[in-house]
Image (cartoon, rainbow, N blue to C red):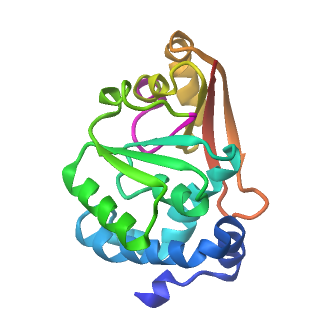
Amino acid sequence: MTEDLSLTAAETVAAEKIFGDRLDLAKRYVTHLATSGIERGLLGPREVPRLWSRHVLNCAIIESLMEQDAEVADVGSGAGLPGLCLAIARPDLKLTLIEPLERRCIWLTEVIDDLGLDNVTVMRGRAEQMVETINARYVTARAVSALSNLAGLTIPLLHGKGDLIAIKGRSAAEEIDKAQKVIRKLGGTKTEVLTVGEDILEEVTTVVRIKVG
């Protein structure tokens, strides 16, 4: 297991740049993912060898798109990707992890407590139930839903001003085409596909960023 969790030389450079003096926290988080995260079905066992490259670094790199001291809502947090990655990389951010499944919420809370993270809270429920409670500067999501559906779940949490940052794959541009009408109706003023981490990641992260207001 330990060998599987070790970083390559390139991953080490990226992880040190992203997490800085909190890299040990990130390593402990990855250990949680590889043990109890697998045992409780939050991730498949085949993901263990690529937890750093495909999941943690891939998610954490989007912190570069966020201003200091911002409030961030992570919709459909699951195993904390990207929410917990951001909380570790950026202690200045205030994270709210929104997750409907109780067993996932319990796991997230256990990990947060073990890592001693004081900038992140877990809220059990669906995003549409949280509109009155949360007013975020950024809303993040990964592997939650197609953009045409995701926009309606996430953009209202911005209350007219902010960014939706959705981690997507190769179909990002196609999803934008299908979602344009919905995005405009919800107040989206600019929608773009960004690649993040080209300077430090071997596998860059593709993001759809929707600016509102």
**Residue under the point 52% across and 42% down:** 72
Q: Is residue 1 left or right of residue 197?
A: left
Percent from the top left, x then y, of residue 11?
A: 65, 74
The image quadrant of residue 211 is top right
The image quadrant of residue 162 is top right
**Residue under the point 52% across and 26% down:** 158
Looking at the rendered image, the quarter that the N terminus falls into is bottom left
Residue that protrudes farthest toward the right in the picture:
199
| In front of the other: 122 or 118 | 118
Q: Is residue 73 above or below residue 189?
A: below
**Residue under the point 68% across and 71% down:** 20
Residue span colored magenta: 137-150
Q: Is residue 76 left or right of residue 52?
A: left
Q: Is residue 22 left or right of residue 104?
A: right
Q: Is residue 80 above or below residue 208?
A: below
| In front of the other: 191 or 202 | 191
Q: Is residue 102 magenta?
A: no
Q: Is residue 47 above or below residue 148?
A: below
Percent from the top left, x then y, of residue 31?
A: 41, 78
Q: Is residue 103 above or below residue 130?
A: below
Residue that protrudes farthest toward the front in the picture:
118
Residue that protrudes farthest toward the left in the picture:
102
| In front of the other: 212 or 87 | 87
**Residue under the point 51% across and 74% down:** 25
Q: How many marks?
A: 0
Percent from the top left, x then y, of residue 181?
A: 53, 12
Looking at the rendered image, the quarter that the C terminus falls into is top right
